[in-house]
Amino acid sequence: MKIEGMRIAGGLAACLLGLVTLAQPGRLMAQVPVAAPKPAVAPGTASIHGHVTSPLGQAITEGEVRLSTDRDTNATSRKWDYTFPLDAGGDYRGTGIKPGNYLGVVLQNNNTVDFMPAQLAAGEDKTVDFDMSRKEYIDKMSPAERNKMEQTRKANAEIMAKNAKIENLNALLRQARADTAAGNYASAIKAMTDATVAKPDEALLWDTLGDAQLGEAVAASNAAKAAKTTDASVPDKLAAAVTSYQKALTLNAAAAKPSPDAAAVVNNQLGQALGRLGKTQDASDAYDAAAKADPKNAGKYYFNEAVTLYIAGLTTGKVDGIAEAADKAIAADPTRAEAYYLKTQGLAPLITQTPDGKFVAPPGLVEACNKYLQLAPTGVHAADMKGLIAGLQEQVQTNYKAAPTPKKK
């Protein structure tokens, strides 16, 4: 009986840490300039193209470049001969321009931002860039403008350093997920331990560390079982996973916008680790929390709760809570045959015997057997269900048919 949604074998979340956007004074944006194709120049006309850069060295992506031969009037009354919009990379281009001595002006919301001379000859494709980080432009800025620019420059430097750190953490995340999927748990644990040291307040990192630790614990336990021995390190490995998952849940709950999906997924993982440690009540609480956070998948989490309690019972001989967890799974999804089987495993040990030797089934046992047979008449547990009903000398109440035997050709 397998736990659903376990993430130690490859089904890992795809999310990464998000980068921070650079500070943007006004409408400036950081963009990578895209080289524009060289425009064809019609005979007798000129073309112009160029790039517009803010005092911070960022591309200006909103506004336009205008050309005018009118140099004697102010910008509000000036007559414009040509207008070329800025694109997403901070570039502009224009063709079919009458040769002449122009003033090129960058405007945003009809306000002049910068200007450059642009003398265009017939057949020429002229490059006119507006680089506002040049000394002459900076020197003409007011003290207030210069102070604002320096504050933004400082903020952007801090953001770029933060983004470099996030990029490194995302690389560690990708490495850890790949290593966990491949069974290289020690490497994954090392990567995520480094990541949580670098950014201890990020829930996603602790969650991914928990997955690697749980994977290592399960692998060690399976290896020991295959060798018919025990591995004393398994409880410590499971405890480490529990600690990481609990840290992830605490951080997620404290976030400005806690993620219900993250809470559900991490609690599902936590339930598995706690169940393997024998802490069945704590495991049940974790699965219940997962179902509460993600009601639409509650059936899966309650089913996992029942499986966890059932597996624990194989070792301890206790069946406490198995039937109750199965009932919750059945209530959430009454079409899941395996949930009825788990219910029978929680109830069967409670069968009593009268003084005259008759077996008495606890309430719900026979009904669960019959419901399993109705849903899975040829299921892997069908023979067990029929045998249990027969041993209780009860009637099979459900009409079911075995799969027809293929005819020989």
Image (cartoon, helix red, strand yellow):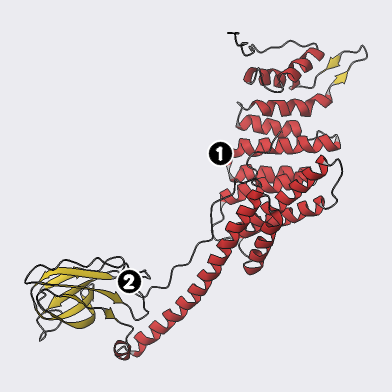
Spatial separation of the CA atoms under disc 1 and disc 2? 42 Å
Q: Is residue 387 left or right of residue 266?
A: right
Q: Is residue 141 left or right of residue 358?
A: left
Q: Position of residue 100 (x, y in %)?
A: 9, 80
Q: Amino acid at mark 1?
A: Lys
Are discs 1 and 2 less than 8 Å apart at CB? no
Q: Position of residue 406 (x, y in %)?
A: 60, 11
Marker disc for residue 27: 2
User: Which secondary structure, mark 1?
Assistant: helix
Residue at position x 73%, y 44% in the image: 283
Q: Amino acid at mark 2?
A: Arg
Q: Of circles 1 and 2, which is in front?
A: 2
Number of callouts in the render? 2
Q: Position of residue 145 (x, y in %)?
A: 35, 85
Q: Position of residue 213 (x, y in %)?
A: 71, 54
42, above or below 366, in the image: below
Furthest residue in direction right, as rendered = 355
Q: Nearer the viewer, residue 29 or 117?
A: 117
